[in-house]
Amino acid sequence: MRILQALPALNSGGVERGTVEFAADLVKRGHESFVVSNGGPMANQLRDQGSNHIQMPIHRKNPASFGQILPVRKLLRELRPDIVHVRSRMPAWIIFLAMKTLPARARPAVVSTFHGMYSVSPYSAIMTRADHLIAVSECVADYVRNNYPVAESRLTVIHRGVDVDAFRQRELSPQWLDGWFRQHPQLAGKRIVMMPGRISRWKGHMDFLGMMAQLVEQRPDCHGVIAGGAEPGKEHFLTELKQQRARLNLTDKVSFLGQRNDMTELYLLADVVCHMSTRPEPFGRTITEALASGTPVVGYNRGGAAEILQACFRDGLVTPDNTSEFAGAVGRMLEAGPAMISIPYRFRREAQTQATLQVYQQVLQQSAGQT
């Protein structure tokens, strides 16, 4: 098959990483993989893994993006993909408007992925016009069912998978550890409580600071680390977090690591990983990655994050927004022995790839039957 994935850009983020990983799996299975986006740091990785990247400014949520309709129409005529997989709303609008003027026989089948609970609006409804819809969790699927008239036969839940072997049974290299402690000498001998994820208000970093303030009263040997950078335009929130850290007397107890490219090592280094999103998150990839590393995770019992913990590590579930209960759970994890963690097949990368290819085959068969 010839597959074209469309998304705004290839910066850091779960959607971007998932797109690049899936593209690599397509190439390994002998398919032709193309990605159209505005580009970004991950474009080189995409190309190095055998996919083709077409850079187009399809990322802006404003009328100027509609200037890309004719260029995308030309791209579709030249590539003639079997499937176009749209992963965001503005690229989906451009794709559908570009296809509108193509002859019926030249139109590819379209699959969309709901990576989140998008605002209910005509703008978001474009994602439901695909031949088939993928939801990244049961809670996202329920959101689609409750807000859009989508037939059940057109909706499939495919959890975002993790390459378990890439995280499991690894050891931290002496070289990495030496570099780590030279850069962060204050963490020597500490129990590491990690909060991974980009700096964003709804990710729960304020809750994390409040929880750490309670935890260190009982466990002064703990040190919190926040692994993730502030997105452009969000730097002011990072400043707020640092001010709150000072107010809570946590300046020497919590460290901001910024954007990292060594998360695999950090999951192994951490004693506990925290997930504290202040609203239901569609999935929660960091949870699966940490659990695949054998590191226990504590998270609020809501949204897609709860689905993962319920299936993989129920001991990590706590009442949403209850930072005292959260601190107590983290303390118990630090006292406990090795965590009993199980990663069901549906949360693994190979399951995600196989299920997505099955959706593609189903859509192509349906399209063939209609012609």
Image (cartoon, grey):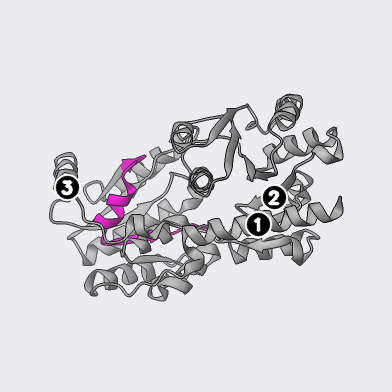
**Number of dots carrying numbers:** 3
Name the one closer to the observer, 89 or 81. 81
The amino acid on which the numbered mark 2 sits, given as a three-letter code, is: Val
Q: Amino acid at mark 1?
A: Ile
Mark identifier at residue 111: 2
Magenta range? 257-280
Left or right: 317 as drawn, with respect to 336: right
Mark 2–mark 3 Cα distance, whole angstroms, equals: 43 Å
Instruction: Choose between 77 and 217: the one closer to the eye.
Output: 77
Judge whether residue 281 can be spotted in this image.
no
Q: Dot 1: few (<14), some (14–19), or many (≥20) neighbours within 10 Å?
A: many
Q: Which mark sits nearer the N-terminus, 2 or 1? A: 2
Q: Are marks 2 and 1 in contact (CB under 8 Å)?
A: yes
Nearest to the observer: residue 47 or residue 306: 47
Examine the rendered structure and indicate whether residue 30 appears above or below residue 60. Answer: below
Nearer the camera: disc 1 or disc 3: 1
- The vertical placement of 50 against 155, above or below, is above
Q: Secondary structure at mark 3?
A: helix
Q: What residue is disc 3 on? A: 177
- Between discs 1 and 3, the one toward the N terminus: 1
Q: Residues within 10 Å of mark 3 (few under 14, many from 20)?
A: few
Residue at figure coordinates x 31%, y 58% from the top left: 212
Q: Residue 145: give x, y in percent of width and height.
A: 73, 64
What is the C-alpha distance between the residues marked 2 and 1? Answer: 7 Å
Which dot, 2 or 3, sits closer to the camera? 2
Q: Is residue 224 left or right of residue 287?
A: left
- Looking at the rendered structure, the kind of residue marked 3 is Leu
Residue wearing tag 1: 134
SS at badge 2: strand
Where disc 1 sits, the SS reads strand
Position of residue 362 relative to residue 47, above or below, is below
